[in-house]
Amino acid sequence: MLHSVLNYGEYQQDVDEIGSFVYPIEANKVIILDFKYVKDSLLYKGVYTEDYDATKENKYLYRIDAGNQFTFSPTNKITTIEKAVKRISYWFQKFDEYSSNKLVNDVKQIIEKHVEEIKIDVQTKFDSLGKQDKKNCVITFMITENEEKKYLGDIKIFRDIFKEATMKEFWVPKTPKVNGFCYLCRKEKKIARPREPFSFYSVEKIGFAQNLDRSESWKQLAICSDCALLLSKGKRFLDKYLSKKYVWMQVFPNPKTNLQKRIDDGSVN
Ligand SMILES: [Zn+2]
């Protein structure tokens, strides 16, 4: 099954590295905080909404950690306005080490300065939405610089932070450093166990710990970073095109295809 997902990943060559780690959002509306540079000063210009557009996932740059504690970019889903604005402020605290970057620091400062005004503006915009839109609403921000409007995913520093934070969380134990044979491509490379996109075993059961040492259990599925990237891309393909929900259970029908053969003979690239 993993090899099939790997094949789907190879097929997704137009998905870049960031794109394979961004989470899709089921949303109707996006509330956008509007910031604009005038000369060298960043100004808060208010709030507006747009319809959620799934083709802009890489621009919204949404991803949340496994413990549901923080997002990897300031974009987050709205449950209450208080929580949503707090999550944005928390993002700047969590990634404070990057506040030496002028843009990050400017946004942090302007949000701190206008936080009460922002809460009121977002609440007013949120209250004007329909019932379904309120249930499926996301908050993010745009920065206009030199008359060019940019989403978070268009701005290098936010992409860099997103990628670095994702990689820190992605591997067990940490980034691949140990030499070994990758379970998927069978090549000798640096290997580790990715936490995503699937968790295949439990350390609660006897037999899942190499050398009877729980800390070695990551070796049950040790793969290289190239294969991990392809798996993540393949999982996105499954999510988009082959995901079905039966009652509460999500299943991925995995049709037998000749995709690998077509990749091998070059008819799919
Ligand atoms: Zn590999």
Image (cartoon, helix red, strand yellow):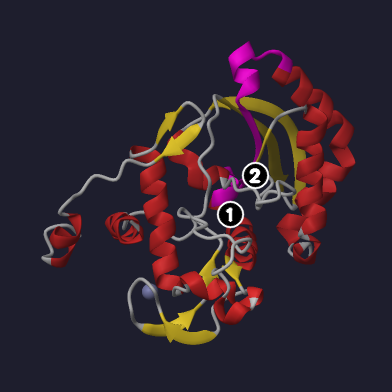
Residue 42's disc number: none
| Quarter the N terminus occupies | bottom left
Give the quarter of the figure containing the C terminus. bottom left
* Residue 237, magenta (yes or no): no
Q: Secondary structure at mark 2?
A: strand
- For the point 53% across and 31% down, the residue is 26
Where residue 57 sits in the image (x, y, percent)? 49, 42
Bounds of the magenta segment: 127-153
Q: Position of residue 48 (x, y in %)?
A: 65, 26
Q: Is residue 138 shown left or right of residue 28?
A: right
Spatial separation of the CA atoms under disc 2 and disc 1: 9 Å
- Return the residue at label 1: 155
- Tell me residue 105's x, y (percent): 79, 57
**Horizontal side, residue 194 vs residue 164: left or right:** left
Q: Which residue is mark 2?
A: 143
Amino acid carrying label 2: it is Ile
- Comparing 47 with 259, the one in front is 259
